[in-house]
């Protein structure tokens, strides 16, 4: 079966600075994957490259088998920001725009998400708090029936109770064969969700393991594994 994500020998420089180097990563379909790394590690950049928003890389990127930019964008759902929309625009109007642009935008799923996230889509963008804005980004992103979902720190501004509710049910918003890549600094909170973990450090992917293999091989949880790599307690030759 075609993999959800295939990255080979990816290197990306911006303003003469190497942001990512020699990245190789294959993620199968149907997985929920944590993309972990400290601030500035390159997680957002990796998502932007997958979504063809950052360009000029060396190496190959395939999303559900598609290598060309427009096809990759069609196969994956990523709402980076809500820039480009008029601040006075209502959420419903933004959703209408998404429905017009993305053939896989599911109107009923969007309405279910809006209800679940307790959002009022009669509000305008400039009436949203930070957490409400993030919930809206989650709704727009998951309303598409995509092959791959990219969620970049989706819960950062969301209150702890809502966060638990969303994390507890996020899997139900993806089709079984879809893959979800989630970057988050609240590693313990998202750990129960994760089938696999990808750790970005020193401008590259240093580890890619299933949560089960981490438990079996190291006898620890996902967060301890991630911290162990950063603290130098887990070495390259153990990965
Ligand atoms: N527009 C830009 N121009 C130049 N360098 C950039 C730009 N955006 C990001 N970078 C650099 O790219 C590197 C990776 O940044 P990126 O935003 O991908 O990290 P991140 O892992 O998502 O971090 P965080 O956890 O803080 O969100 C950083 O060193 C950052 O300084």
Image: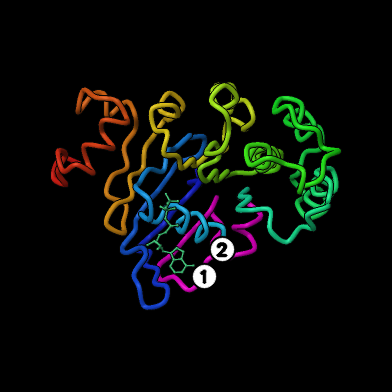
Residue sitting at x 26%, y 30%:
224
Residue 85 shown left or right of residue 23 in the figure: right
Q: 113 or 9, which is in the foreground?
A: 113
103 sits left or right of 35 in the view: right
Q: Residues within 10 Å of mark 1 (few under 14, many from 20)?
A: some
Cβ of mark 2 under 8 A from ligand 1: no
> Which residue shows up at 80% across the image and 58% down it?
86
* Place of residue 97 in the rendered image (x, y in percent of width and height, measured from the top left): 82, 52
Between 108 and 8, the residue placed more toward the observer is 108
Residue at 26%, 37% (x, y): give it.
227
Confirm whether the magenta stretch covers residue 110: no
Residue 70 among magenta residues: yes
Give residue 18's quadrant in the image: bottom left
If the image is split into quadrants, where does the C terminus sit? Answer: top left
- Residue drawn 68% across the image and 58% down it: 83
Counting from the top left corner in percent of width and height, residue 194 is at 43, 30
Which element carries disc 1, helix, strand or loop? loop
Whether pointer 2 and pointer 1 mark residues with C-beta atoms closer than 8 Å, the reply is yes
Q: Position of residue 225 (x, y in %)?
A: 26, 33
User: Ligand 1 near label 1 (Cβ, under 8 Å)?
Assistant: no
Quadrant location, ligand no. 1: bottom left
> How many labels were placed on the picture?
2
Check disc 1 and report the residue beneath it. Answer: 55
Q: Which residue is mark 2?
A: 52
Classify residue 85 by image quadrant.
Answer: bottom right
Q: Tell me the colour scheme of the image.
A: rainbow
Query: Eyeballing the image, is 47 above or below 174?
Result: below
**Whole-percent x, y for residue 101 in the image:** 78, 55
């Amino acid at each position: 079966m075609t993999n959800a994500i295939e990255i080979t020998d990816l290197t990306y420089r911006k303003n003469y600075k190497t942001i990512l180097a020699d990245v190789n990563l294959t993620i199968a379909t149907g997985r929920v994957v944590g993309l972990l790394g400290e601030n500035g590690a390159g997680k957002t950049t990796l998502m932007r490259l997958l979504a063809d928003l950052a360009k000029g890389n060396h190496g190959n990127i395939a999303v559900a088998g598609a290598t060309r930019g427009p096809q990759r964008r069609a196969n994956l759902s990523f709402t980076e920001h809500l820039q480009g929309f008029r601040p006075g625009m209502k959420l419903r109007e933004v959703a209408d725009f998404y429905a017009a642009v993305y053939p896989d935008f599911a109107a009923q799923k969007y309405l279910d998400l809006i209800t679940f996230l307790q959002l009022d889509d009669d509000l305008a963008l400039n009436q949203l708090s930070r957490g409400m804005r993030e919930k809206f980004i989650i709704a727009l992103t998951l309303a598409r029936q995509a092959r791959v979902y990219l969620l970049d720190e989706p819960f950062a501004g969301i209150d702890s109770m809502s966060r638990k509710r969303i994390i507890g049910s996020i899997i139900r918003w993806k089709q079984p064969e879809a893959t979800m890549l989630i970057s988050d600094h609240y590693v313990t909170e998202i750990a129960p969700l994760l089938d696999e973990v990808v750790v970005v450090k020193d401008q590259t992917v240093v580890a890619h393991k299933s949560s089960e293999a981490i438990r079996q091989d190291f006898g620890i949880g996902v967060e301890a594994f991630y911290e162990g790599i950063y603290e130098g307690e887990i070495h390259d030759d153990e990965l």
